[in-house]
Image: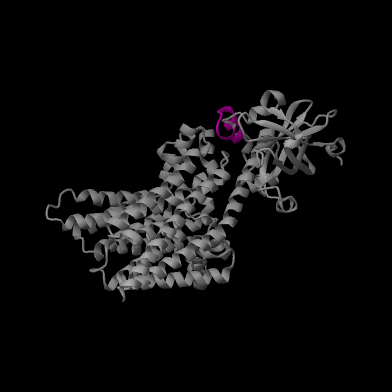
Amino acid sequence: MPGGQSSFQSRASAALSWLVLLGGIITIGVAAHTVLSSYSSLPYSDGWAQISVVANGENPLSLAWLWRQHNEHRLLIPKLFLAADLRLFQARQVLLLTSIFAVQFLHWMLLGWSMRVLGGWRGPLWRSGAGLAAFCLFCSSQWENLVWGFQTCFVLPGLFATLSFVGLLLYRIALQRPERQHEWRFLLLSIAGALGATYSLASGNLLWPLLVAMALLLRLGRPAVLTYLVTGAVSTVLYAHNYVRPGQHSNPASALRSPLRLAEYVAVYFGSSWVRQEIGWAVCFGIAGLAIAFAFLWHLGRSVRVTQGFSVQLVFTLLFCMGTGFLTALGRLNLGITQAFSSRYQTVALLFWCCLGLLVLAASAAGTRQVSLVIVELLFLAVLLRGANLARYSLREARWHGFQLDAATAALFTGLDDREQFYYAALNPEHLKRKVAFLRQNCLSIFSDDAYSQLGAHLDSMFRVVPSDECVGALQSVSTIKDNGVRALKITGWAWDRKHHEPPSHIVVVANGAIVGLGAIGDTRPTIRAANPYLKSSFIGFTGYVRDVPQSFPLKIYAISPVSPPEACYITTVGSSEMDPHN
């Protein structure tokens, strides 16, 4: 190849690698924005488990609770995170959401370290690999796991699996050194990683046979193989002790009798990373990815002696992801194929594609032609662009999720039983009042700041009232809520802060100067934005609640600006005819 052309391809590869790395870093920023923009301190769905335990007088750190089965899982480690958030951070979900982000960041750092130390990657090769890993670990298509505090259980197994495989490979390296000092430490690290994954999610049990197979493949000797066998057997026996199969999930034996539907579920599970609710395309992408994965498995078995340690790590991580997808299909097939599109499964599916991409990158680097690396980097950029195109949907879903929690919070503050709103926030009305009372009495979660104290206070004592021309908005609907004879209203509309060019933080409803209702802002109003070009966001819709509606005073709605000190701006008034419960 002429020197000029080789130099050009080298420069092109370097430039493209920087773009891939930049794309990965931007993905991390988008993930952080997703977390912040959809944050709510209200627990969601399974996140109430810890509150229920403490409200019932149990110790959240007791071995009985930590070991108690949750669906098919034993969530010992995630429950420790839940307990820490409850005890140290007032159950505000802050520690949990920060931990999820930190776990993914640590996983990224560990993969980047593995590329350099175990794979010997440098320069454009390392930058491209690190950029792809950042994209896959923080892609917003897994938005549920980024904004739902309980989901530490979904991100921990991937980190622990990588740590376990890395520990085994470091043990192999230590055995090859002449001095061979303290090599057992890496074996303990590997075992600790496998135990961490096992007691974070049921799929962690897959690591034990994988580690045994990896030790045999790499010929680590009988002591290492027996250590994994014995530890894995003891762990599995303990895990299975008093295990009860969840009745709401499909019977694995029944699922195995439907092999085509099972295969379709697995294909959608992995292929849904690149499409939106399109089963046909998801199946195509899934089959293609799995076929490439099996090709790498075949190649590894034939050339393990010359394969770099990092490639071995990637292949076994692929097997872990594929096994996780298969186990999920066995237990969830009864919920339908579309359930495989759940965003929380994307954490595993994206790790699968990350390993696949890194293996392709390693194969291109092993060739003699620089042009192959350029082609792979261009492919990575195409993947990043596709991810950017899909990110807007994930961000919209995450923000909608956050708004539903905030609206449910407003209903809980006002003491109203809005079953429709509670459904969207995954709140189980059974025993809800007792749990909310516990939160209020102990100043936890939504009752840990002064938002609740605004009810009954005078508007002027809480906010600085500004002229009404600094905001704009409208009332769109008023409906009555029947709650034990209480005269209550649910109101919806939209609001915009003209002065600060952003949506308000929330709304308050005022009667005779006193705050009698609260509301959340963040619902989408795309038609309103389209009709008003000055609006910079469509997340301007609000839902509010008023309990004990006064008979003689109109209700005035104020938008509260997210500034310090907070400002209240008048929007509109709910008329007496609209307040009539018989209207």
Q: How many marks?
A: 0
Across and down, in percent, residue 179 comes to 12, 52
**Residue at the extreme bottom:** 1
Magenta residues, as a range? 435-446
Q: Residue at x 42, y 36 (%)?
A: 62
Quarter of image, res 566:
top right
Q: Is residue 424 left or right of residue 51?
A: right
Reply yes or no: does residue 379 show up in magenta.
Answer: no
The answer to which of 481 and 145 lies nearer the viewer is 145
- Residue 443 placement (x, y as % from top left): 56, 29
* Residue 259 appearing in the image: yes
Residue 213 position, x and y percent, is 29, 63
Residue 170 located left or right of residue 338: left
Q: Quadrant of the C terminus?
A: top right
Q: Is residue 474 left or right of residue 321?
A: right
Residue 50 vs 338, above or below: the answer is above
